[in-house]
Amino acid sequence: MTVSFKTFGCRLNRAETAQFEADFAAAGFLRVPFDAPADIAVLHTCAVTQTAENECLKLLRSLRVKKPDTVLVLAGCAVEVVTPGTLRALGADLIVPRDQKGELVSIVQRHLGLHPGSRPAVPARSTKRASLKIQDGCDFFCSYCIVPHTRGQPYSRPFDACIRDAQAFIDAGYEEIVVTGCNIACYRDGTHDLVGLLSALAALPGLGRLRLGSIEPGTVERDVAALMAADPVFCQFLHLPIQSGDDAVLARMGRRYKAEEIAGTLRDALRLMPLLGLGADIITGFPGESEEAFGNTRALIDMFPFGNLHVFPYSERPGTPAATFAPAVPEPERKRRAAELLRLKERKRAAFAQAFIGRPVRVLVEKLDPAGYAQGWTGEYLGCRISGVPATQISKLITCVPYQAESGMLTARLPRTESARQPRNCT
């Protein structure tokens, strides 16, 4: 039987979908592209914004019309906030809540009258990057966020299970492991916290490099930065969901830090790693955000060499306290502020990329483009295209030297001394 997948939303959703894919493969299902005919279609949904939720539901309704004989399976956050009756009316055959995700394939098999199959340890992926889910859930209850209601209380996977799965990824040939979760700063299993887990992962033999998902500010980010600076197996990239650079806005959001704390963390991290890649999430036009408050956010971003910014105009999410806050910022103004920060992002990303001209970098090669250039990402999360790379190096870590940076994209060549045996470090 055939199965297809559509994933909305975050990296954690993508990591979970990778496991779904592996589970179905182990049970004898054949994966096909999502737009191809399939016996089963799995929609892994998102509900972080009303717009994201609406997009998932629109696709569900459309699929029911286009694929009347396909078994439509829904999982993910929208399942937790939309009533089962509504989902079934839109066309869902099976609805899998968060506490049953691990049994998704068995649920489908029972629905089809098939005998449940076994569960594999390692997802099969087309690239040498694996996502290691270490925890789920969040209890921070920021005023704009629905996630604590859709993913529940924090839960950390057992330390030994995380290590076992990471080693299995390495043994299967994955060059890069991405540590992911809903709020990875909350990780704790017995005496093991996030820093302890990361230290143990970094010490695993054969690991190419270790990349971290976003880390909540005001938690363990300073200790993580120190660990990152001390061990070259870590990609030197730190992503913080800052959301705002104004203390009053941060307080209304229910965030656990002030702008100066963010600035102090970033200054200290850059002292340890001058070429550290920085990323952030920013919300513009949150209720009550004045022009002065927005200016404080813009000034904070401008102060540091951010290479990546995810900027979102505020969107009311029903079911959250902020959806009722006043005064509301007009939607056109929210978008104008977001556009201003995105222009700033492009300038800062271009400047950050220029700093790598002539410096060796490590790139995980993902594909060859039509012009014959290899393409991939540096440890600092800069896109890079490399000349002279044979197809045999796809999904491998290679060292190259950038000689050009345009619009934040590096162009590089292999060093003359490049050998077939590569060192472990990211930079």
Image: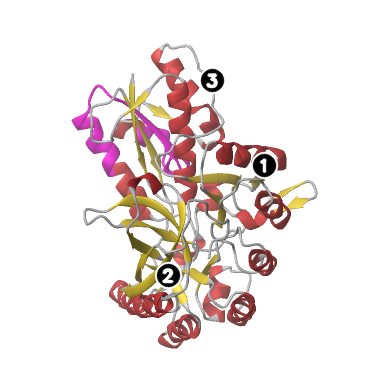
Tell me which numbered mark, 3 or 1, is placed earlier along the sequence: 3
Among the 4 quarters of the image, the one containing residue 267: bottom right
**Amino acid on which the number 2 mark rests in the picture:** Leu
As drawn, which residue projects farthest toward the bottom?
292
**Amino acid on which the number 1 mark rests in the picture:** Ile
How far apart in space, not on screen, are marks 3 and 2 (Cα)? Answer: 41 Å
| Residue at position x 60%, y 52% in the image | 138
| Residue at position x 51%, y 79% in the image | 245
Q: Nearer the viewer, mark 3 or mark 1?
A: 1
Q: Can residue 313 be seen? A: no
**Amino acid on which the number 3 mark rests in the picture:** Ser
Q: Is residue 7 left or right of residue 118?
A: left
Mark 2, residue position:
309
Q: Answer yes or no: do the residues labelled 3 and 2 have beta carbons within 8 Å?
A: no
Find out whether residue 373 is within the magenta segment: no
Residue 76 image position (x, y, % from top left): 45, 41
Report the magenta residues as a range.
Answer: 58-87
How far apart in space, not on screen, are marks 2 and 1 (Cα)? Answer: 31 Å
SS class, disc 2:
strand
Mark 1, residue position:
163
How far apart in space, not on screen, are marks 3 and 1 (Cα)? Answer: 21 Å
Mark 3, residue position:
118
Find out whether residue 69 is within the magenta segment: yes
Residue 360, compared with residue 299, is above or below; it is: above
SS class, disc 1:
helix
Residue 389 image position (x, y, % from top left): 35, 54
Tell me which numbered mark, 2 or 1, is placed earlier along the sequence: 1
Q: Nearer the viewer, mark 2 or mark 1?
A: 1
